[in-house]
């Protein structure tokens, strides 16, 4: 059984969970992907205690997912922007949202839709694609040891 941390795990998923595995953290990332940047925006959206939000934002900055950017002086005020590392979380966040829509959405349907703005608004679907044949993967997935696996 895994403990509260995954320090001994040689697994990229376990390492990712060390950063984003706590539920409020992933919701902060979701809100950042939706365009929220300021502490008060995150606080209003999530409704969690200020000390918890402060802790989660600090950890995301330390991990390199967010950067703290000054937007005002006297008094200093900061906002939180996704780094390239944080922007890369759009795929897993959309995949989790897509999974939730398929299995957990209420009778009215999905609460949010993801649209591609560059082409005029086509629906965005997260999925698997083979790098060799460029075909969508429907099944037949095998996970095997990679070069970073311990022997």
Image (cartoon, helix red, strand yellow):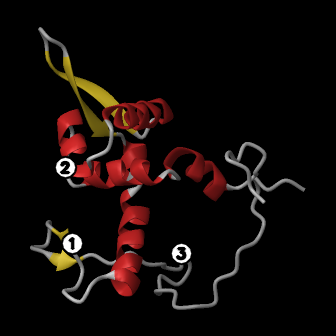
Q: Circle 2 sits in a helix, a strand or a loop, which is it?
A: loop
Spot the residue most to the top: 74
Disc sitting over residue 35 in the figure: 2
SS label for mark 1: loop
Mark 1 or 2: in front is: 1
Residue 149, quarter of picture: bottom right
In the displayed orientation, state which residue is furthest to the right. 151
Counting residues from the start of the chain, the first of labels 2 and 3 encountered is 2
Of the numbered discs 1 and 2, the one sitting upstream in the chain is 2
The structure residue drawn at horizontal position 18% and vertical position 36%, both measured from the top left corner, is: 40
Residue at the disc numbered 1: 112
Q: Is residue 79 above or below residue 29?
A: above
Residue 51 drawn at (x, y percent): 37, 31
Which residue is tagged 3? Answer: 131
Crowd rating for badge 1 (residues with CA inside 10 Å; few <14, some 14–19, many 20+): few
Q: Regarding mark 3 in the picture, which secondary structure is present there?
A: loop
Query: Looking at the picture, how far across and down is residue 53, in whole percent?
Result: 35, 37
**How far apart, in angstroms, are the residues tagged by discs 1 and 2?**
14 Å
Q: Residue at x 35, y 54 (%)?
A: 27
Crowding near the residue tagged with mark 3, few <14, some 14–19, many ≥20 C-alpha atoms within 10 Å:
few
Image quarter of residue 71: top left
């Amino acid at each position: 059984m895994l403990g509260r941390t995954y320090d001994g795990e040689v697994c990229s998923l376990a390492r990712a969970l060390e950063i984003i595995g706590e539920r409020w953290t992933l919701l902060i990332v979701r809100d950042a992907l939706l365009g929220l940047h300021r502490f008060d925006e995150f606080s209003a959206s999530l409704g969690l205690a200020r000390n918890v939000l402060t802790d989660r934002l600090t950890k995301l900055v330390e991990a390199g997912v967010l950067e703290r950017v000054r937007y005002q002086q006297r008094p200093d005020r900061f906002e939180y922007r996704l780094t390239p590392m944080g922007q890369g979380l759009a795929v897993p966040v959309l995949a989790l949202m897509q999974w939730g829509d398929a299995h957990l959405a209420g009778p009215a349907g999905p609460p949010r839709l993801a649209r591609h703005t560059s082409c005029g608004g086509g629906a965005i679907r997260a999925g698997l694609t083979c790098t060799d044949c460029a075909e969508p993967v429907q099944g037949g997935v095998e996970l095997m040891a990679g070069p970073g696996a311990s022997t």
